[in-house]
Amino acid sequence: FESLTDERRALGLALAVVLGTAFGFVLERSGLGRAQKLVGQFYGTDMTVLKVMFTAIATAMFGLVILSGAGLLDLGAVQLRYPTYLWPMVAGGFALGAGFVMSGYCPGTSFVATASGKLDGVATVLGVVAGSVLYAEVLPLLGGFQSTGKLGTLTLASWLGIPSVAVAALVIVLAVLAFLGAERVERWVATARTATTLPDGAPELVLPPGKR
């Protein structure tokens, strides 16, 4: 909010609260406030996370491009605030993924779960806080690793050499293909989990975890 002037700071904070609450509401209604729903993404049993988050990314991306084209948003100024540091981002991605699998939550959904009164969500939030404090303590020992692989403001549009609106259109097409592929994965995993073929060809019912 440093970019907001004094007279607009209160408005910016109010909008942040409203938008953040709305986002949390959508996550909860989508079932992303439950670890079981989130972990299903990694086992191929429930691809809701892919569908919801990919929809959010594609919608936000297309909306930003439209606002930029209409002269209502300086997309370059927004992108300038998010430079690319390749190796720290790769390492951070692996660390986030590992934490996601172990806890069943990402940082955002852990707060949604906490707001819903789920103790595993509270435990994850405490882990996020503890991890943040630990990172701050070990930062001087990293030897500047957090600044390696600096590529500046690297975007798909600049990397591919095509307009931003074309990238947004490609992402939407990719999202649709990903949704279709996710549904096929769900059907394949469901079939594999509900029945196995014995040597004599007779199907055997396999109960889901927790029912055995």
Image (cartoon, grey):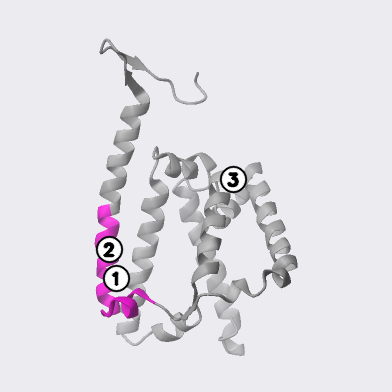
Looking at the image, the residue that sits furthest to the front is: 143
Report which quarter residue 128 is drawn in.
bottom right
Q: Position of residue 81 (x, y in %)?
A: 51, 81
Q: Which residue is mark 3?
A: 103
Q: Position of residue 69 (x, y in %)?
A: 30, 83
In magenta segment, residue 101: no
From where the camera sits, is residue 118 visible? Answer: no
Question: Label 3 amino acid?
Answer: Ser
Question: Label 2 amino acid?
Answer: Ile
Of discs 3 and 2, which sits in the foreground?
3
Which residue does the image show at 27% across and 59% down from the upper left? 174
Label 3's element?
Answer: helix
Range shown magenta: 155-177
Which residue does the image show at 64% across and 75% down from the upper left? 144
Q: Which residue is mark 2?
A: 172
- Does 49 appear above or below 9? above
- Circles 1 and 3: CB atoms closer than 8 Å: no
First in sequence: mark 1 vs mark 3? 3
How far is the residue under mark 1 from the one under mark 2?
Answer: 6 Å
- Circles 1 and 2: CB atoms closer than 8 Å: yes
From where the camera sits, is residue 51 visible? Answer: yes
Task: Tell me the tag on residue 168.
Answer: 1
- Does 211 appear above or below 6? above
In magenta segment, residue 173: yes
